Amino acid sequence: MNGRVIGIIAIKGGVGKTTTVSNLAASLANDFGKKVLVVDANFTAPNLGIHLGIVNPQYTLHDVLASKVDVPKAIQKHELGFDIIAGSLVPKCKIDPFSLKRKINHLRYKYDVILIDSSPTLNEEMLATMIAADELLVVSSPDYPTLSCTMRAVKVAKMKKTPITGIVLNRVRGKKYELTLDDIEQSVDVPVVSIIPEDEMVLEALSLTKPAVMHAPGRNVSVEYKKLAGCLIGEQYKDTRLWPKIRNFFVVDDIKKDDVNRTIAKK
Ligand SMILES: Nc1ncnc2c1ncn2[C@@H]1O[C@H](COP(=O)(O)OP(=O)(O)O)[C@@H](O)[C@H]1O
Ligand SMILES: [Mg+2]
């Protein structure tokens, strides 16, 4: 196995980085049978563990990056079929963020995909993710303040020469006042590979510490995450729901740009 390391970034909190990581991990493991590791590299405010129901891990990424324990000790098996290295909510030791790449590099032989959840702040925490990753997904939402942060994130990633697979446009309500896929693509010159709708179910799933793809697998938001998961490993997720099939039968010429972008991005 020679797993790919994918960093999920945004220079903004609350856009959906952690939600994206947990949903992609659950889908890659359960829909595609892949071996997946998620790593919480939001060192200052780690909450990937909380999203996934892990509150007080015995060993954390902080212990690893402080060279207190070896990586395998900090890896936990999650009941949803993937592994996780959580962060410490009350870190007690000084860490070396830039050792992240070295510490996780040798885990590639064990996993198909390693997903890194990153810090929202453009500092050494986020740079550590950019350096450790083979490729990046930049999470954004369809409003100007977030777009300005996305433009900055893309610029820094390009400077660091970490390839960007695409933009994940999250929390889309389909309103006229929102920025469109074309607006975003023209501004950042990176393809939008996923459009994830805003859905209260995501918050309901969070309250149950479950990824949306497991809590409500047939909801649009879940299916979009599954399509993105497939794209990351060069496979196509087949939407087996009845309604989209009926719709596709009647609506000709309904080619979506994000579908096209995913096909192009598929390795
Ligand atoms: N598509 C969505 N629809 C509704 N709520 C969402 C969606 N994506 C994320 N959220 C919610 O937004 C909040 C912030 O998401 P999170 O993934 O923690 O963001 P980040 O990691 O970028 O700070 C969480 O409460 C999450 O459940
Ligand atoms: Mg987060």
Image: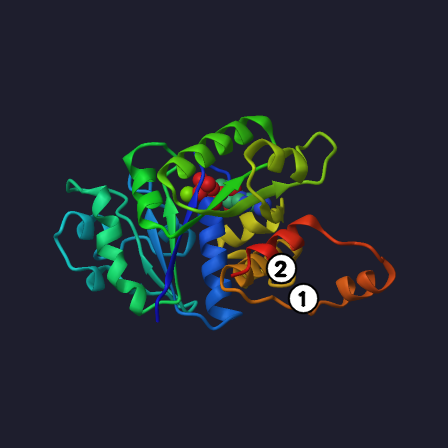
**Image coordinates for residue 17, horizontal then vertical, percent:** 46, 45
Q: Which residue matches tag 1?
A: 239
Horizontal arrangement in the rendering, residue 47 relative to residue 200 (left or right) = left
**Image coordinates for residue 138, horizontal then vertical, percent:** 48, 42
Label for residue 223?
A: 2
Quadrant position of ligand 2: top left
Q: Does the beta carbon of the residue at mark 2 sit less than 8 Å from ligand 1?
A: no
Q: Which amino acid does label 2 sit on?
A: Val
Question: Residue 35: which quarter of the image?
Answer: bottom left
Q: Which residue lies furthest to the left in this view?
A: 68
Task: Tell me if residue 25 comes above or below residue 200 in the rendering.
Answer: below
Question: Residue 70: which quarter of the image?
Answer: bottom left
**Image coordinates for residue 125, horizontal then vertical, percent:** 30, 38
Q: Residue at x 82, y 60 (%)?
A: 247
**Disc 2 element:** helix
Does residue 13 show up? no
Which badge, 1 or 2, comes first in the chain's sequence? 2
Task: Tell me if residue 96 comes above or below residue 226 in the rendering.
Answer: above
Contact (Cβ within 8 Å) of mark 1 with mark 2:
yes
Q: Does the beta carbon of the residue at mark 1 sit less than 8 Å from ligand 1?
A: no
Question: Residue 263: which quarter of the image?
Answer: bottom right
The N terminus lies in which quarter of the figure?
bottom left
Foreground residue among 185 and 37: 185
Label for residue 22?
A: none
**Image coordinates for residue 97, horizontal then vertical, percent:** 23, 42
Foreground residue among 56 and 11: 11
Task: Tell me if residue 163 comes above or below residue 177 in the rendering.
Answer: below
Label count reads 2
Foreground residue among 253 and 7: 253
